[in-house]
Image (tube, rainbow, N blue to C red):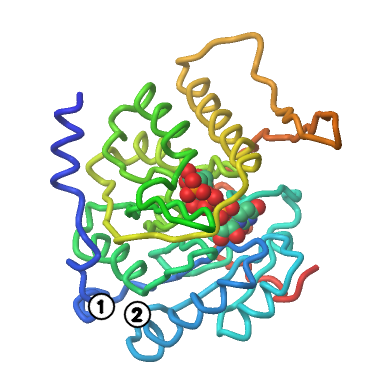
Amino acid sequence: MFTEVGRWLDARTSRAGDWLPEAVLAAKGDHRVSVVLPARDEERTVGEIVGRIRRDLRERLPLIDELVVIDSCSTDATARVAADAGAQVVHQNAVLRGYGLLPGKGDALWKALAVTTGDLVVFIDADLRNFGTHFVTGLLGPLLSDPSVAYVKGCYDRPLADGTAAQPHGGGRVTELVARPLINLHWPALAGFIQPLAGEYAGRRAVLEEISFVTGYGVELGLLVDLLGRVGLDSLAQVDLGVRVHSHQPIEALGRMAGHIMLTAWSRLEREGRLVTADPPNGRIAQVRRLGNGRRLHVSDVGVHERPPLITIPEYASGARLMPERRQP
Ligand SMILES: O=c1ccn([C@@H]2O[C@H](COP(=O)(O)OP(=O)(O)O[C@H]3O[C@H](CO)[C@@H](O)[C@H](O)[C@H]3O)[C@@H](O)[C@H]2O)c(=O)[nH]1
Ligand SMILES: O=C(O)[C@H](O)COP(=O)(O)O
């Protein structure tokens, strides 16, 4: 089993430096490229990322056709900062309203796929502190050079910066403690993905619109597992983007993220008929917080929902793209 993983790792892993911007542009041909940044309260970082993409990959090189920030119910100035930097800003809850409002990153990505028009779609997290345009060109390179590649996942070294010192490889705690063990236990063919939860990836719309999106932080694991089933390992690739520095969430928030990921794995195992139970898992997580000299329980919903393949949504399938009002509803 791991022989196949090793072979895939060698064959399907490239480095961002293998994909020079001018060569990527030359390979673009008739493709149309959309870049999407999901952003919830990212006013500190989103402007810099949008500005770099606009200047370097739209104005200097005409590589990117569409640059969308999907504002995921931000309470800060994310939308204004992103618009000022040159992005088209769409509010998550303004898209496909008839399908109900659901929270979380996966829903934001599904809505972004619905409103964009590129046949190639690149997703980049909006909290990156060391963004470089090689993130975008590196992810596009394998898709533009090999029609058999359907989806490209970023990988990188992940430092953990705790405010006083950085551990060069200490980041990605949910990845290492939850996602990687789950993947190895249940989908070992995916074990070669160095950063299975990376928020930087690119895919062909024709494939992405045919799979469902989990609404919360389970979206990345859900996409990998579902793509493996749909297109097979050899149509998946990864590209080494160097080092990624981002805003770390508090450990309690990572516990809830882990809950999303475990429930996503559970949903796929159940769907694959590998788990049969009359007693589904509890969708809430209780975390004990210190309160003065005592303690209290803090209960959060970590249940995940499914957004169906976009191609099954009539408004989308009719070909009418769904760009809504730019302002928040
Ligand atoms: O409800 C939300 C939550 C987050 N985000 C955005 O999604 C990106 C990633 O979110 P973040 O909270 O920074 O996640 P990380 O702690 O970095 O988690 C890692 O693991 C997650 C689970 O797989 C992935 O979704 C992330 O991309 C990956 O970086 C950021 O731009 C957020 O602003 C939303 O758009 N909506
Ligand atoms: O991907 C992960 O594992 C989570 O985003 C946590 O990352 P961090 O440990 O670098 O904060």
Residue 57: where, in percent of width, then height?
A: 37, 82
Marks 1/2: CA–CA distance: 9 Å
Q: Where is residue 244, by image quadrant? A: bottom left
225 left or right of 27? Answer: right
Residue with the mark numbered 1:
21
Q: Which mark is residue 63?
A: 2
Rendered view: 68 above or below 169: below
Q: Is mark 2 within 8 Å of ligand 1?
A: no
Residue 296: where, in percent of width, then height?
A: 83, 30
Q: Are marks 1 and 2 in contact (CB under 8 Å)?
A: yes
- Position of the C terminus, as image quadrant, is bottom right
Q: Residue at x 57, y 84 (%)?
A: 85
Residues packed near mark 1 inside 10 Å, few (<14), some (14 to 19) or many (20 plus): many
Residue type indicated by callout 1: Pro
- Position of the N terminus, as image quadrant, is top left
Residues packed near mark 2 inside 10 Å, few (<14), some (14 to 19) or many (20 plus): many
Rendered view: 135 above or below 306: below
Answer yes or no: is residue 70 visible: yes
Answer yes or no: is residue 314 visible: no
